[in-house]
Every structure is written in structure tokens, then in C-alpha cells.
């Protein structure tokens, strides 16, 4: 039985987000572009502000009070993030975001381990940030890319994954929740299948972290990447989690300060994980901000926010689905979908839909969502995407639906 | 953004060109061709020109995208008929000026139906949509000039 929880008080929660109180033109803002980036609660904004006002210094250097505070904030944030995803703090590497996390694994693990003819398994559901780093590394190493496709509800074809995996597979890198569709992938099952052929699994968790409780141990992945700004923290900060023994064996990604032990003319020795992968002065305020976001999310409780989000997304799929000429992509069962409703309106291009919605104060994204393989599968070059967070309401869905009627009036 | 500016954006003439584009087919005896795409939204157009020396006899296009990009390139192919490359370039410049909000450029009759796109200038994020066709046109003309340079170098 699911754990009992207090239902989310959305009216109260919305007051935590100063940006949501705005009026765009003469209409109250309806922010439905959360898959692009989440808005920031007061707690995150204040934590960053407070850090710069009271604790700013460089980390792991100054033998002075501010240096001590900054280091404590930075390493404390790492411990907080480790608790958030159920990891060991030495396994939490700070990066600029999901893209850099994936690039780090592709470049460091990939160059050290991939040989000609080795296979990398990807899917057509991936964001470009989980495609291009692997394409680049495949070109350098002679490794081969294998793709798993989607079914008619834009879910992964698990039988195709089964077929593609073989003894030449070295790593699979797969999205947890699709940014373009909202499809939730069965990561535990994928991990079991990938491990059966002796390969590793990297998971792009950028869209998962704002919607569901991520437990890297329970998922069974080997690497997991996420971004601060998608989970209501600041931009420019993200996480690479990896299993300790893998990280220990991997060569450094970038060279510089912070990541060394001893530097001599002939060469250098490197710090232990996680610092081995953190060259240069890091985004200290970013780590403070993302840690505040984890506190905020855990205080609300993922059970409560997911219940509310499912209700809103289900309502959006139903209401949009009732409009003649509207085509919705992704799984029909709303429990297989998180946060995203990607759609098209007959006769109207996604870009035009977005402009008309903007004139109603509604922010959505139009385009290929950095997922051109998804667009190819859907047979379009662009979709309109409404993406939701726990602070969105049923009334906002009504506003979206009303605005789609304006689109239909213009493009009928 | 007011409903008025939205009406100014989506004029009937634009929607007409979007629904029933002019000169949208592949030319059989294509002289010059170039494609342009907007990586942000995935809109793509290819402009083909049948030319005699530096005069455009026929301009056609293929591609896909939003109402603004598709109407703009459809309107553009209409006004290019009979233009020299220099005249086409000055049309491109006047159209760009109109997109930057130049009211006088918008009065220029040589822009033809393109003046209906004046309202786009108030939607800065949509200006690249309107300019897509002209980017492809410039590419096509540049390819002719590259070819002439190459021929010049051979002789």
C-alpha cells in the first residue's frame, strides 16, 4: 500500500514561487514549459543570496573562516544530494548539468574502454545530449551505435532492446523520462537486461528528478545524470552519479586546479573521486541552490507532488484529446507518463500555436525539443509541448484548452 | 501582446500563402539551389532558381515549417521573377529593414505581398522564421557567384 501523505496544497505552494505571480501582457502567467526549466522557489533564491552575502570564498583553499564556510556549504550540498538520490557522497560529482555528466562518462569511460566494434546502445527517445556525446566518442573509438525504437504510443520497444543487446554491447545510455513525450521508462528492468550481457547502464535523469523520487541504488544503473535547473534549482549545476569502482578506474575528464594531488614537470597525480572530476573553481553557489531544491522537494514529498501532477497531466490529456484535430503523442495510460503533453493541432504549426498561446500569457515550447529522432518517429518536424510541474493547476489546463480554441479559430 | 498585434501577425494574406503556397514544387531544370534551416525549430526551406546569367527567370521552393516561414518564402518567390541578383539582394535588404521595424521599407511596393509580414517585426522571436527564405535565396545566389569565380580561375 502506498504511504499515506498529505495532499499538496497547490495554492500555498504557488506562493513559494515569486515568478508565477506575474502578468504577461494583461493575462496571468501560465507557465507550462517546465521540461525546459523549472521555476525557483523562494527557498532556493534565498539560499543562493545568503551564500553570497555571508559565505562566499573559494573552496578547499583558504585557511580562513569564509573559506571554511564555503567548503562546508559545497561539501554539505554534496552530502545532501547523495541523500536525495540514495548514494554515497564520494559518488556524487558536480557538473554543469546533465549534458556535461553524459559527456564526462562518454569521454572518460568511453575513451578508456571502448574499442573498434564495441557497441553502444541508445534509443530514438533520447535528447540530443544523450546522443551527440556518444556519436562523438563512437567516431573516435570505432565503436558502433545501436538504436532501440519506440512503439505506436511512443514507449520503448523492450523486445527490440532484448534483440539489440549482445556480448559486444559495452554500455547502454537511456533516458529515464522523455523530455519530448513524458514517457517513463522501466529503468530497473532495462538495468537487469543490460547487466545480463555484461554491459553498463547510464541513465539520463534530467526529467526524472523533478517528478519522481530517484533512488540510484534501487534503479540498478551504473551512471545517473541530472540537472539542477530542471528540479527547481539554479542553472549551471548538475550531478553525475556513478558506482564508486567505475569512477575510481576512470581517468580524469578535465585537468586543472582542485583535481590534482601533486603536480610535477613530468606529470601529475590526481585527487580521489569525486574531486578527480572537478577541475577548476566549481559552481559553489549552484551547489547551495540545488541542495536547497532537494530540501524543498523532500519537504513537499514526492508522493504528494506526483499524485497532484498525475491528476493535472491526466486532465490535460483528456481535455486536449476532446478537441477535434488535436493529436497527442506518448503513452495513453497516464501512469506511464510524467509531466509532458506533446501535441499537434491540424493545420497549425507548433511555432504558431506557441505564439498564439503566448498572447494568452501561456508559455509552452514549440519545436523539436532537442529530440529530432523522436520527431522522426512521430512523422513531424516539431510539436507543441505543454510540460507541467507540481505548481500547475487544473484551471491552467482550462486556460490552455481555451487558447487552443483560439488557435483553431485562426488556423481553421 | 494584444489581440490586435496577433491579428496583425496572422493576416489573411499570410494564412492564404501558408495554406496554398505559390511556386512550391521542384523545378525540373534547376540552375541554382540552396537550403536554409532554423535549428531552433526545425523549419527548412530549399530555394531553387532558374536563371539566365544574373537574372532570375523563375524561383521555386520546397520545405516545411510554420505559417510565417512558409508564407514568407512563398511571397518571396513571387517578387523575384525577373529580378537580377543585385535587385534580389536589395529586396532582401528592404525586407530585413522591415523586419527591424523600418516603416518606410514596409511601404515599398516592390516587396509585393511580403509587406503583409510587417506585423512579424513586433514578435522578435518570429523574425528568423520570416527571414528563412531570404537566407536560402542568398545561398543560391552565392553559389552562382562561387561557380563564376571557379570558372574565372580555370580560364
Image: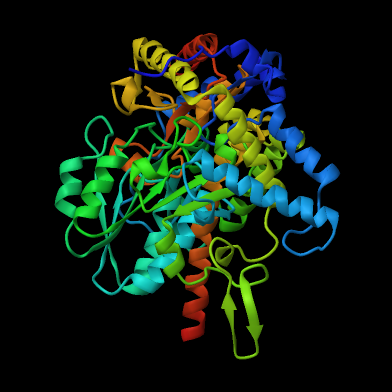
Q: Is residue A281 left or right of residue B40?
A: right
Q: Residue, x 41% and y 56% (percent of image)? A: A243
Residue A227 visible from this viewpoint: no
Q: Is residue A381 above or below residue B118?
A: below
The image position of residue B120, as x and y in percent, is 63, 31
Q: Quadrant of residue A47?
A: top right
What colouring does the structure picture have? rainbow
The residue shown at (60%, 62%) is: A278
- Give the residue displayed 19% in from the left and 54% down from the top: A196
Measured as percent of width and height from the top left, residue A205 is found at 44, 42
Up the image or down, B26 lies above or below A252; here it is above
Count of numbered badges drawn on the protein: 0
Query: For this rendering, which residue is in front, A76 or A115?
Result: A76
Image quadrant in which the N terminus of chain A is located: top left
**In the image, B83: left or right of A288?**
left
The image quadrant where one finds the C terminus of chain A is top left
- B78 shown above or below A267: above
Image position, residue A317 (x, y; %): 38, 17
Residue B149 or A323: which is nearer the viewer? A323
* Res. A310 image quadrant: top left
Name the side, left or right, on which A271 lies relative to B18: right
Residue closer to the observer: A139 or A65 = A65
Q: Is residue A194 visible to the viewer in this orientation of the structure?
A: yes
Residue positioned 45% across, 63% down in the render = A247
Question: In x, y percent, where is residue A318?
Answer: 36, 12
Toward the bottom, the furthest residue is A266
* Direction from residue A103 to residue A11 in the image, left or right: right
Amino acid at each position: 500500500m502506498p504511504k499515506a501523505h498529505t495532499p499538496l496544497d497547490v495554492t500555498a505552494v504557488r506562493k513559494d514561487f515569486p515568478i508565477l505571480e506575474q502578468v504577461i501582457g494583461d493575462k496571468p502567467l501560465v507557465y507550462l514549459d517546465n521540461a525546459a526549466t523549472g521555476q525557483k522557489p523562494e527557498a532556493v533564491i534565498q539560499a543562493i543570496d545568503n551564500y553570497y552575502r555571508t559565505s562566499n570564498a573559494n573552496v578547499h583553499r583558504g585557511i580562513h573562516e569564509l573559506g571554511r564556510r564555503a567548503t562546508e556549504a559545497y561539501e554539505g550540498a554534496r552530502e545532501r544530494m547523495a541523500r536525495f538520490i540514495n548514494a554515497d557522497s564520494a559518488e556524487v560529482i558536480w557538473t554543469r548539468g546533465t549534458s556535461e555528466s553524459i559527456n564526462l562518462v562518454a569521454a572518460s569511460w568511453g575513451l578508456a574502454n571502448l574499442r573498434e566494434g564495441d557497441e553502444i546502445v541508445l534509443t530514438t527517445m533520447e535528447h540530443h545530449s544523450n546522443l551527440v556525446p556518444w556519436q562523438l566518442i563512437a567516431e573516435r573509438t570505432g565503436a558502433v551505435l545501436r538504436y532501440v525504437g519506440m512503439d505506436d504510443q511512443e514507449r520503448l520497444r523492450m523486445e527490440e532492446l532484448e534483440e539489440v543487446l549482445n556480448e559486444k554491447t559495452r554500455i547502454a545510455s537511456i533516458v529515464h523520462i522523455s523530455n519530448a513525450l513524458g514517457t517513463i521508462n522501466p529503468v530497473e528492468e532495462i538495468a537487469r537486461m543490460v547487466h545480463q550481457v555484461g554491459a553498463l547502464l547510464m541513465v539520463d535523469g534530467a526529467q526524472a528528478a523533478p517528478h519522481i523520487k530517484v533512488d540510484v541504488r534501487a534503479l540498478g544503473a551504473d551512471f545517473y545524470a541530472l540537472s539542477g535547473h530542471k528540479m527547481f534549482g539554479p542553472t549551471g549545476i548538475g550531478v553525475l552519479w556513478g558506482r564508486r569502482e567505475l569512477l575510481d578506474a576512470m581517468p580524469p575528464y578535465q585537468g586543472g586546479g582542485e583535481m590534482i594531488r601533486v603536480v610535477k614537470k613530468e606529470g601529475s597525480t590526481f585527487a580521489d573521486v569525486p574531486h578527480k572530476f572537478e577541475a577548476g573553481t566549481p559552481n559553489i553557489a549552484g551547489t547551495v541552490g540545488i541542495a536547497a531544491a532537494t530540501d524543498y522537494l523532500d519537504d513537499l514529498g514526492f508522493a504528494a507532488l506526483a499524485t497532484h501532477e498525475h491528476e493535472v497531466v491526466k486532465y490535460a490529456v483528456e481535455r486536449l484529446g476532446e478537441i477535434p484535430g488535436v493529436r497527442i503523442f506518448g503513452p495513453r495510460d497516464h501512469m506511464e507518463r510524467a509531466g509532458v503533453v506533446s501535441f499537434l493541432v491540424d493545420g497549425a504549426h507548433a511555432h504558431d500555436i506557441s505564439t498564439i498561446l503566448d498572447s494568452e500569457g501561456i508559455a509552452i515550447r514549440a519545436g523539436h525539443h532537442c529530440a529530432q529522432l523522436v520527431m522522426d518517429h512521430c512523422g513531424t518536424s516539431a510539436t507543441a509541448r505543454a510540460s507541467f510541474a507540481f505548481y500547475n493547476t487544473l484551471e491552467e489546463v482550462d486556460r490552455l484548452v481555451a487558447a487552443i480554441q483560439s488557435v483553431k479559430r485562426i488556423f481553421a | 501582446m494584444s489581440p490586435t498585434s496577433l491579428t496583425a501577425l496572422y493576416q489573411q494574406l499570410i494564412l492564404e500563402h501558408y495554406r496554398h503556397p505559390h511556386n512550391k514544387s521542384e523545378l525540373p531544370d534547376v540552375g541554382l539551389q540552396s537550403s536554409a534551416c532554423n535549428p531552433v525549430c526545425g523549419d527548412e526551406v530549399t530555394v531553387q532558381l532558374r536563371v539566365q546569367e544574373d537574372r532570375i527567370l523563375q524561383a521555386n521552393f520546397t520545405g516545411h515549417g510554420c505559417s510565417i516561414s512558409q508564407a514568407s518564402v512563398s511571397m518571396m518567390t513571387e517578387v523575384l521573377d525577373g529580378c537580377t541578383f543585385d535587385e534580389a539582394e536589395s529586396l532582401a535588404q528592404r525586407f530585413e529593414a522591415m523586419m527591424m521595424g523600418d516603416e518606410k521599407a514596409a511601404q515599398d511596393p516592390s516587396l509585393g505581398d511580403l509587406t503583409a509580414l510587417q506585423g512579424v517585426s513586433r514578435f522578435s522571436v518570429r523574425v528568423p522564421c520570416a527571414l528563412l527564405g531570404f537566407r536560402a535565396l542568398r545561398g543560391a545566389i552565392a553559389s552562382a557567384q562561387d561557380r563564376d569565380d571557379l570558372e574565372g580561375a580555370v580560364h
